[in-house]
């Protein structure tokens, strides 16, 4: 797995994931808020499995 999630993209994914999980834990939104684990994981791991399918890469690192 090569990193394909860049800085701003990573920060947004982690933030959205944490907000959704927090809203679920406080009872503000329903159980679907646990889907926040997906952006949290992709931001933390710096890899999005959908990006290669779409030919996208927001990571500024050079490919070796």
Image: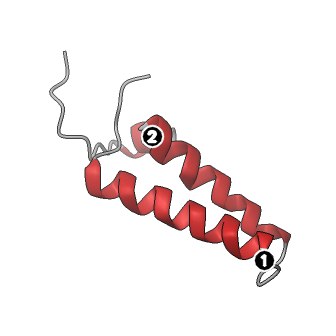
Secondary element at tag 1 = loop
Asked whether residue 2 is in view, the answer is yes
In front of the other: 19 or 31: 19
- Residue 53 numbered tag: 2
- Per the image, the residue denoted by label 1 is 26
Q: Residue at x 40, y 46 (%)?
A: 54
Q: Nearer the viewer, mark 1 or mark 2?
A: 1
Q: Residue at x 15, y 27 (%)?
A: 62
Q: Quadrant of residue 35?
A: bottom right
For this view, does 45 lie left or right of residue 8? right
Mark 2 nearby-residue class (10 Å; few <14, some 14–19, many ≥20): few
Pointer 1 with pointer 2, Cβ within 8 A: no
Q: Quadrant of the N terminus?
A: top left
| Image location of residue 25, percent across then percent down | 79, 69
**Among the two numbered marks 1 and 2 on one chain, the one whose residue lies closer to the N terminus:** 1
Give the residue displayed 84% in from the left and 69% down from the top: 31
Q: Is residue 28 above or below residue 24?
A: below
Q: Quadrant of residue 41?
A: top right
Q: Is residue 19 above or below residue 13?
A: below
In the image shown, does 15 or 52 lie closer to the viewer? 15
Q: Is residue 42 left or right of residue 11?
A: right
Residue in the foreground of this view, choosing between 24 and 63: 24
């Amino acid at each position: 797995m090569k990193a394909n999630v860049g800085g701003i993209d990573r920060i947004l994914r982690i933030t959205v994931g944490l907000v959704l999980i927090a809203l679920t834990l406080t009872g503000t939104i329903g159980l679907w808020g646990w889907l926040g684990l997906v952006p949290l994981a992709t931001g933390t791991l710096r890899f999005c499995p959908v990006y290669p399918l779409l030919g996208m890469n927001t990571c500024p690192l050079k490919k070796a």
